[in-house]
Amino acid sequence: MGSFEAFAREGHLNGMGFLQRAKKVGRKFENPVPTQLGGFRLMVKLLPLYYANREQKTPAEPVGPFRTDASAYDMLPASGLRVTWFGHSASLVEIDGVRVLIDPVWDERAAPVQWFGPKRFFPPTLPLERLPRIDVVLISHDHYDHLGKGTIRRLARLLPGVQWVTSKGVSASLRKFGVAASCITELDWTESVAVGEFSVTSVPSRHFSGRGMTNRNETLWGSFVLKGPKHTVYYGADSGWWDGFEEIGKAYGPFDLTMLEIGAYHPLWGDIHLGPDNAVKAFEALGGKGLFMPIHWGLFDLALHGWRQPMTRLLELVSELGTMVWSPEPGRPTEVVAGTTVQADWWRG
């Protein structure tokens, strides 16, 4: 594996259609298309819905336990691509000899404090101390379900010198939590960084950012293309539906694995989260090739829907369309093999 090239180079597609650098108005970044974000009016609409909601939003009985066999990392994946899904959006992607830890959240709650807020449905499947060698830690944006303070503090101590890649402005939080500034590379949309022959490229998504009431959109968000000599993975992070998916697929695909969010959605915030129906639509727009990995579900209660509903609905959709779903059990290192579906049923109870 080559050393990490600690610089960002502008993507060669900058200026083409939707694939442009992010724009700002004052201190705030803008979405690539007009986007409705929630405010006081949304809260007024949500309160009666939460009060009347009868969905099973958290597991009635404990799920798991799930355990990651750390010895699996002693050998490189035979296919060249292996993913361990830790729940929600946290994953370890091993791609062509490079290990990328994505949006790791080992915190008990996806919240500003650890005594209140959305609580994990199951414990971490692997202690952070038992992670294998990590080459890159990728943080897509600064929301609490993607950037947990406790997790970052521990990783900063456990992984000295490891390179961190994130969106513009997020490095302030990483530095605050103990990551050395020299280890952090921020990316604007269409910019890339490289580890030898492997690269990470930030591309636009339709979402928002902020860790408080007063700093919304002062840092950037994005989706990411992970490209090795033999494999390409699209990590969608958080996004609502928009027409840019097709352009991303044409510019950077085809993808061996496409990771798209299916949970924490509702029509009231449909501009910033996909849900199962729009995730399938996005997969097709991105090229519809390879395997579709559902993420952003199964760990935290962040919406009104039942906790199983995103996967239940997804499987209904793909049974009609023939989309190849790749969804392993939490914590299990699983090879990604072209044409081979994985549909673990741990969530059925």
Image (cartoon, rainbow, N blue to C red):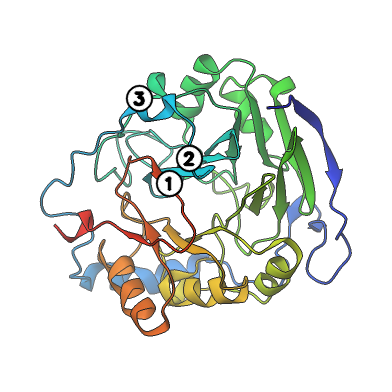
Of the residues under marks 3 and 2, which one precedes in the sequence? 3
Q: Quadrant of the N terminus?
A: top right
Q: Mark 3 and mark 2: span between their CA atoms?
A: 15 Å
Q: Can you see residue 222? A: no
The local secondary structure at tag 2 comes to loop
Front residue of 277/253: it is: 253
Label 1 element class: strand
N-terminal label among 1 and 2? 2
Assess disc 1: are there few (<14), some (14-19) or many (≥20) residues with their C-alpha within 10 Å of its C-alpha: some
Say few, some or many: other residues with alpha carbon within 10 Å of mark 2 (under 14 / 14 to 19 / 20 or more).
few
The x, y position of residue 282, in whole percent, is: 56, 73
Q: Residues within 10 Å of mark 3 (few under 14, many from 20)?
A: few
- Nearer-N-terminus badge (3/1): 3
Mark 1 and 2 residues: CB-CB less than 8 Å, in contact? yes
Q: Amino acid at mark 2?
A: Ala
Q: Which is closer to the viewer, label 1 or label 2?
A: 2
In this image, 58 relative to 291: left or right?
left
- Distance from Cα at disc 3 to Cα at disc 1: 15 Å
Q: Residue at x 17, y 54 (%)?
A: 59
Residue named by callout 2 = 78
Seen from the viewer's position, the closer of residues 157 and 49 is 157
**Residue type pointed to by label 3:** Ser
Query: Mark 3 near mark 1, Cβ–Cβ under 8 Å?
Result: no
Q: Nearer the viewer, residue 38 or 306?
A: 306
Residue depicted at 45% across the width and 59% down the height = 293
Mark 3 secondary-structure assignment: helix
* Residue 142 drawn above or below residue 291: above
**Measuring 40% from the left and 59% from the top, which residue is drawn there?**
326
Judging by the rendered image, the residue that carries numbered circle 3 is 71
Residue 322 vs residue 344: left or right?
A: right
